[in-house]
Image (cartoon, grey):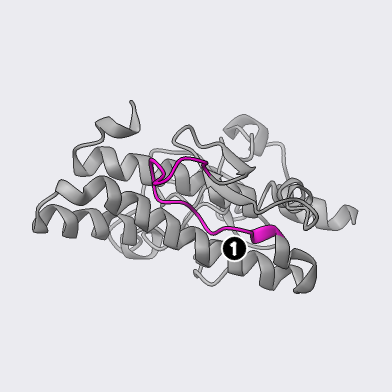
Amino acid sequence: MASSSLRTVEEIFKDYNARRSALVRALTYDVDDFYSQCDPDKENLCLYGHPNEAWEVALPAEEVPSELPEPALGINFARDGMNKKDWLSLVAVHSDCWLLSVAFYFGARLNRNERKRLFSMMNDLPTVFEVVTGQKPVKDKPTVESGSKSRNSTKPNEDDKEEQGDTFCGSCGGGYNSDEFWIGCDNCERWYHGKCVKITPAKAEMIKVYKCPSCQKKARQ
């Protein structure tokens, strides 16, 4: 679907969520690649999240005015002058601002109630900043076998629904859904969609202690 054809709240939110997932991936799982691409010796660079969930570090659009609002310009210049975590947090804040500006650019023709509903849907997801800094609390979900977190979660009962509503994937940031397979990292205690970390239910049954890709990478350093 072309960007110009986005008309409904659902279409705009789908676009927002895809771009957001791309930015979250750039600043978490692909952080080393993203960091290396933000060379301070290069020209003004921007971080883009695309509707196909791909991220890109590139020069800003040449056309004026641009087709869409542009992300923060020159993120690469501050890379070596700041603590890495602080720099990533700064990029995350600017990314959240950009995501909102793009969504409400598409939503310019929505009425008041539709805009309110759109923001409510976006606000139900943790911000890029919250995911990158780990400020969003990740709570445990019930598992098939209480002895291990590395199992597919069962459907929540009435007492668990509110708690599980605050659980988000450490990779894409998507909210908990009982119809999807999840796996919990025994090291950092974050939860992930199995598809995001390429773990199937069958494979999870063979894992005694699961470490997410981020924790595995840290262990190798």
Region in magenta: 61-76
Which residue is at a point 67% across and 73% down the rendered structure image? 86
Residue 170: image quadrant is bottom right
Classify 38 as above or below 79. Answer: above
Quarter of the C terminus within the rendering = bottom right
Residue 126 in picture, x, y percent from top left? 43, 61
Front residue (pair 156, 212) = 212
Q: What residue sits right under mark 1 in the picture?
A: 91
State the residue at coordinates (34%, 33%): 3
User: Does residue 187 appear anywhere in the picture?
Assistant: no
Q: Residue at x 57, y 58 (%)?
A: 73
Q: Report the front residue among 58 and 211.
A: 58
- For the residue pair 148 and 218, the one nearer the viewer reads as 218
**Towards the viewer: 62 or 221:** 62
Q: Residue at x 63, y 43 (%)?
A: 58
Would you place residue 90 above or below residue 59 in this image?
A: below
Q: Is residue 29 left or right of residue 135?
A: right
Left or right relative to 129: residue 57: right
Confirm whether residue 95 shows in the render. yes
Say few, some or many: other residues with alpha carbon within 10 Å of mark 1 (under 14 / 14 to 19 / 20 or more). many
Q: Does 134 sit left or right of 175 as displayed? A: right
The amino acid type, in three-letter code, at marker 1 is: Val
Compared to residue 190, the image places residue 2 above or below, namely above
Q: Position of residue 64 (x, y in %)?
A: 42, 45
Q: Is residue 173 magenta?
A: no
The rendered magenta stretch, by its main secondary structure, is classed as loop
